[in-house]
Amino acid sequence: MRMILHIWRQSGPEDKGGFQRHELDGVEEDMSFLEMLDTLNERIIAAGDDPVTFDSDCREGICGACSCVINGRPHGPGHKSTTCQVRMRAFKDGDEIWIEPFRSGAFPIVKDLMVDRTAFDRIIEAGGYISAHSGPKPEPNASLVPHPVAEEAMDAAECIGCGACVASCPNGAAMLFTGAKVSHLGLLPQGQPERWKRARTMVAQMDAEGFGACTNYAECQDACPKGISIRFIGRMNRDFMKASLCEPDTRQGQLKAH
Amino acid sequence: MLELDAGIPDGDIRDKWRNHLEHVKLVGPRNRPKYDIVVVGTGLAGAAAAASLAAQGYRVHVMCFQDSSRRAHSIAAQGGINAPKNYRNDGDGVYRLFYDTQKGGDFRSREANVWRLAEVATGIIDQCTAQGVPFAREYGGQLANRSFGGVLVERTFYCRGQTGQQLLLGGYQALHQQVAAGNAVMYPRTEVQDIVNIDGRCRGVVYRCLQTGEIRSLAADAVVLASGGYGNVFFHSTNAFNSNATAAWRAHKRGAGFANPCYVQIHPTCIPVSGHFQCKLTLMSESLRNDGRVWVPRNPGDTRPPHQIPEGDRYYYLEERYPSFGNLVPRDVAARNAKYVCDDGLGVDGKQQVYLDFTDAIEQRGHQVIAERYGNLFDMYEEITTDSPFKTPMRIFPAVHYCMGGLWVDYNLMTNIPGLYAIGESNFSDHGANRLGASSLMQCLADGYFILPQTINDSLHDIYQDKVGTDHPAFAQHEKQAREHIDWLMARTGSRTPMAIHKELGEVMWDKCGMARTADGLKEALVRIDELKDAYEHDMVVPGRADTTNQALERAGRLGDFLELGHLMCRDALERDESCGCHFREEHQTEDGEVVRNDDEFGNVGVWEWKDDGPHEKTTEDLTFDALPLMTRSYK
Ligand SMILES: Cc1cc2nc3c(=O)[nH]c(=O)nc-3n(C[C@H](O)[C@H](O)[C@H](O)COP(=O)(O)OP(=O)(O)OC[C@H]3O[C@@H](n4cnc5c(N)ncnc54)[C@H](O)[C@@H]3O)c2cc1C
Ligand code: SF4
Ligand code: FES
């Protein structure tokens, strides 16, 4: 196949950037989207020019590194798939493809298609953990977790931190990412002691990073390669409301109305 | 000659670790903030170690080349993690796990380390559960188990097909809690270029900021390498695209011994290579062999679709040849047998591939159960190949997966350079010549959460008084060398891309130093690699600039190390004139193709020393087999 590619090129965070047009022959259906970009880069390098910069590592949909907007859609045409999982069989000979980075004020562009998502790390730092530093711990079967609860926690925990939810949201909100972590930890018995504080501090950090507010477009759920459900946003909002309306840190560790 | 003292504690194997802990030196909580420790790598080993050390109060500096520590290669581990909890009441225990690991490694691991690993393994499950890792649960709420190859008990814990992800996120969260607390500092998009030794002790690292190209140094009281394995020497492997050997190799070039480089695991169940453009292979978890049956058509040239081939014309070669372990033989055995049947012309459609068939399992257990167990793996397979394993058997073939070899470490996980440690896949100690499934995650977390945080104190306790800073001239000198190397790379204006040369190296390694090796083939490989080194030096092109993100430059730098390491792997494979585990020398096999060890000559670890002015020199560490006497492995 022959593809016509319009690729966002930007030399650094300060550069204005713009699309660069490439034509690429010999694209095979079984190629992954990133292998197609590799092929293009090999040609660019052999010609002595600067290849297209993009993030990727696992190339099987789990590390969350890859992050292209393909024809206006974060992670491209697939359903529940990451950029690296898109195969060229999703396109036809002669197709034009527009390739851009994940765009959001909170994700500055590093170069070309590569962005800086350290804001997500800082949201986790604000409370996305259970304090349990290493050492002897109680027997796990001493605290039973019903199968459906464990499965629900796992559904939320599957988030790969890619940022497609942010890139797809008209408001640039990070609610799905944050809601997934608040829910994963808040569902489990181990996560209860820090549950209310976690919801408060993570939401506060999300705001501080400049992510937008949620106005229920639900684009994020559509774009999410792991199918994280927006019900986790609802869950986070409830925890956040409770945590702000009440004073959760009583001596009993229970919620108490003001 | 390297001086190697493994420092194995005296006493019965059951008491060694406990006794050792009673005698390692300690650093008091008020003194710990005076120490700087660099941790290179945020995979399971690095994240766990960094989080644990920071929580103790050390000042920890953590580096990774990804944009976030959460993306380290460990995230991709699928199947699970072992622990001898004996929840199944099927006779498991510390001794069994020790036994399986020693035997699985074909008696080429250090038995005291393996015992310790088996001993601390149950604590890992407790630790991870406490952190909120959502392990699979049974309906009653208890933790669930599955089985993996090479063992007769069910001791593998898992989180769907994303065990590595969930374990890593646990470590990542713990690490970032320490970042928030100010005990740890993250250096993402950073690549360590060199280590700095001063007066015989490792005193820091030189690193490159991948975003700006700056070369900088960091002084420390100890450096921990948790930089992962070197499987990408083969170009095609299941490792992440950017996994590389640079940190370990550069440490080796500064004096750290490299042990058993030829021990590389080829995983039996991967999606076969489909095109020349492919740069990375996808693993299909070993857990699939719980329910999948491996077979090929019994007659060469049988091109009927699988469901039209009657039972009698199918060759379930693992079940026939290994009746007691069947499809669950260890990886080296499963991989080699796939090669044999394909070499005999029985590969599916005449290609290098065999079937992994779930038809019986779906019939017996039902669609839903199989979907729950393997749904995401089936989806992944279908998305790559467009075939659904629910309808037609998977096609699989072995691929490079894991490196048992690595930096030599003593019982404290310290290399032969005082102050330099190696943990996780980057060291050599626990898996001998073949690793069993679900035991790398176990080893990485054992090293990171429980072993290193206690043993590192031993070399730290008295050194903070004589702190060395980056103003020491050694740092400036190492930085200068690192800059010169980058300048040299940038001056390559030939015609071949780093990736093209790397691909060729991979082909040589796969052909000559892969699943089967011969003396002649290895000698040929050594010559070919020298030629490729020449191409690297004289005909490579590196584009762009060094003062901004330049991924081609990164690849070129890593390739140089892969070329040197590939050369050493072939030499090690040549000089280890026996077969053991994954190291299969065709000259040493039984009539039906099983490995033949030579314990008298090679019951040891081969440790290589880099020489600036000549070829590598080899030293050996003799292994002992007291707790489990040597025997011939049999899975029949
Ligand atoms: C597809 C797949 C599935 C697997 N499944 C299982 C399984 O089910 N069970 C099991 O037990 N094992 C499994 N394994 C093996 C296991 O995942 C790995 O052996 C293990 O995760 C290695 O962890 P690590 O911490 O040693 O290193 P890695 O996770 O590889 O991390 C290396 C770290 O080092 C950093 N780094 C490297 N070099 C540098 C440098 N020069 N400068 C700065 N940073 C650097 C990287 O950024 C990264 O953070 C699997 C492996 C693969 C490939
Ligand atoms: S919620 Fe989905 S889209 Fe957002 S970061 Fe997580 S995996 Fe990516
Ligand atoms: S490269 Fe890892 S998710 Fe795409």
Image (cartoon, rainbow, N blue to C red):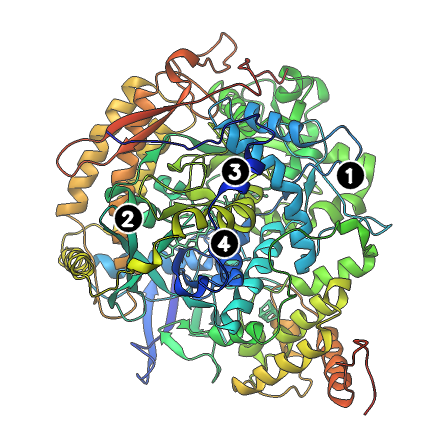
> Which of pointers 2 and 3 indicates the residue nearer the eye?
3
> Which of pointers 1 and 3 indicates the residue nearer the eye?
3
Per the image, label 3 sits on a secondary structure element best described as: helix
Query: Does mark 2's beta carbon lie closer than 8 Å to ligand 1?
Result: no
What residue is rendered at 57% in x and 72% in y? A124
- The answer to whether dots 1 and 3 both sit on one chain is yes
Q: Judge whether A205 appears above or below A185 on screen.
A: below
Q: Chain of mark 4?
A: B
Question: Residue B148 in the image: x percent, y percent?
Answer: 65, 34
Q: Judge whether B166 appears above or below B352 on screen.
A: below
First in sequence: mark 4 vs mark 3: 3
First in sequence: mark 1 vs mark 4: 4
Q: Give the amino acid at mark 4.
A: Ala
Q: Chain of mark 2?
A: B
First in sequence: mark 1 vs mark 3: 3
Q: Which residue is mark 3?
A: B20
Q: Residue B183: which numbered mark, if any? A: none
Q: Give the amino acid at mark 2.
A: Arg
Residue B490 lies in quadrant: bottom left
Q: Chain of mark 3?
A: B
Callout 3: few (<14), some (14-19), or many (20+) C-alpha neighbours within 10 Å? some
From the viewer's side, name the closer residue of B71 and B511. Answer: B71
Q: Which residue is mark 2?
A: B201
Residue B305 lies in quadrant: top right
Q: Judge whether A78 appears above or below B446 on screen.
A: below
Q: Residue B49: which numbered mark, if any? A: 4
What quarter of the picture does the N terminus of chain A occupy? bottom left
> Which of pointers 4 and 2 indicates the residue nearer the eye?
2
Q: Which residue is mark 1?
A: B87
Q: Give the amino acid at mark 1.
A: Tyr
